[in-house]
């Protein structure tokens, strides 16, 4: 890539916008339009991460890292320069489109009582949680008009997987959760296939920007589990979207000394516990301290809270978790 192409890429991906899509939040304004916030690159408790949106540069007074958006992508995703470029190019192609789609689905949620009832049945009641997770609903049939109206081409929608070859909304009649560079759709009924992602990677750990600052982290496999724990007041929770973690997610869990509480589903056939033990071994070899939380038989964290479990009971399970 030429120097000119690199400058063009950096111009098209403002550092501030990129940071915000990685869940970074500016906390304190400084002079000349600069901002301070918690550093996403180390365990930061007092805002020490400075962002200069005009020059598209960052600097952390805690860990000493600084640079442009490419340098940030290298450090944050723990990849080398060419991979960081590839991630940014992919981001430039899909992020604004997925963000628009997610925003549209969010507005639709409040117009569809079947979707709100479903969320209620899964224990998601608070508006604060719905907004925190940016939960939406895809009623089907109107996304295409909305996005083409904003200037996106039908082929871009197809390429992102938002619309099928036949022109239908791919996440039709699903609750939609925005992920890093993807969307996850949960159907309101067990059939058809309840889980659907758009093509491409499921991304890193969900909610990691917040959880990574904690010395102990609760890892769950599903977004509804994440929601239940968040609603119960646990903020050190993250989600791997399935029991099989990708390399990036493993990397994230191992990027600093911490204790990870694995809370996979207590399936009656034992598959969740089996997956937890296997992952526990991998993490321990990487120097992470691991506890495996035993939920009552047949439960996942979501159903535990839906069946009247409460935060102190869950805390007791954490404290009793086997190393
Ligand atoms: Zn830092």
Image (cartoon, rainbow, N blue to C red):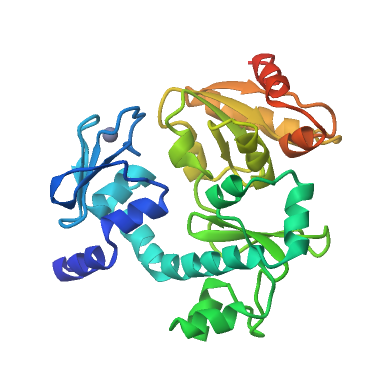
What residue is rendered at 60% in x and 31% in y?
233
Is residue 1 visible from the viewing direction of this image? Answer: no
Give the image location of residue 116, x and y in percent.
Answer: 73, 57
Q: Is residue 17 left or right of residue 172?
A: left
Give the image location of residue 86, x and y in percent.
Answer: 36, 61
Q: Nearer the viewer, residue 189 or 123?
A: 123
Is residue 301 visible from the viewing direction of this image? Answer: yes
Q: Nearer the viewer, residue 289 or 25?
A: 25
Instruction: Classify the position of the C terminus by image quarter.
Output: top right
Numbered label tally: 0
Q: Nearer the viewer, residue 259 or 319?
A: 319
Whether residue 160 is situated above or below residue 49 in the rendered picture? below
What residue is rendered at 69% in x and 46% in y?
125
Q: Is residue 29 left or right of residue 277?
A: left
Q: Specify the quarter for ligand 1.
A: top left
What residue is rendered at 49% in x and 47% in y?
204
Give the image location of residue 306, x and y in percent.
Answer: 78, 37
Give the image location of residue 294, x and y in percent.
Answer: 74, 24
Whether residue 145 is situated above or below residue 47 in the rendered picture? below
Instruction: Classify the position of the N terminus by image quarter.
Output: bottom left
Q: Nearer the viewer, residue 80 or 32?
A: 32
Whether residue 229 is situated above or below residue 315 in the rendered picture? below
Q: Quadrant of residue 314?
A: top right
């Amino acid at each position: 890539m030429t120097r000119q192409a690199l400058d063009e890429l950096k111009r098209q991906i403002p550092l501030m916008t990129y940071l915000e899509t990685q869940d970074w939040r500016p906390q304190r304004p400084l002079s000349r339009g600069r901002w301070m916030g918690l550093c996403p690159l180390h365990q930061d408790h007092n805002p020490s991460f400075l962002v200069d949106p005009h020059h598209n540069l960052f600097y952390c007074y805690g860990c000493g890292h600084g640079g442009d958006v490419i340098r940030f992508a290298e450090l944050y995703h723990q990849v080398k320069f060419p991979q960081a470029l590839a991630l940014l190019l992919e981001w430039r192609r899909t992020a604004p489109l997925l963000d628009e789609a997610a925003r549209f689905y969010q507005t639709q949620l409040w117009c569809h009582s079947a979707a709100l009832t479903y969320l209620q049945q899964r224990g998601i009641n608070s508006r604060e949680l719905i907004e925190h997770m940016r939960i939406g609903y895809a009623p089907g049939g109107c996304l295409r008009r909305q996005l083409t109206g904003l200037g996106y081409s039908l082929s871009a929608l197809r390429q992102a997987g938002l619309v099928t070859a036949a022109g239908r909304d791919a996440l039709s009649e699903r609750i939609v959760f925005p992920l890093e560079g993807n969307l996850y759709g949960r159907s309101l009924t067990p059939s058809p296939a309840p889980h659907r992602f758009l093509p491409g990677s499921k991304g890193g750990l969900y909610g990691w920007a917040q959880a990574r600052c904690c010395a102990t982290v609760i890892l769950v496999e599903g977004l509804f589990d994440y929601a239940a724990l968040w609603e119960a007041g646990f903020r050190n929770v993250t989600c791997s979207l399935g029991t099989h973690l990708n390399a990036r997610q493993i990397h994230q869990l191992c990027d600093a000394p911490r204790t990870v509480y694995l809370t996979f589903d207590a399936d009656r056939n034992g598959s969740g516990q089996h997956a937890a033990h296997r992952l526990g071994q991998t993490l321990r070899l990487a120097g992470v301290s691991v506890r495996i939380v035993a939920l009552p038989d047949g439960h996942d964290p979501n159903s535990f809270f839906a069946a009247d479990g409460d935060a102190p009971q869950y805390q007791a399970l954490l404290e009793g978790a086997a190393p």
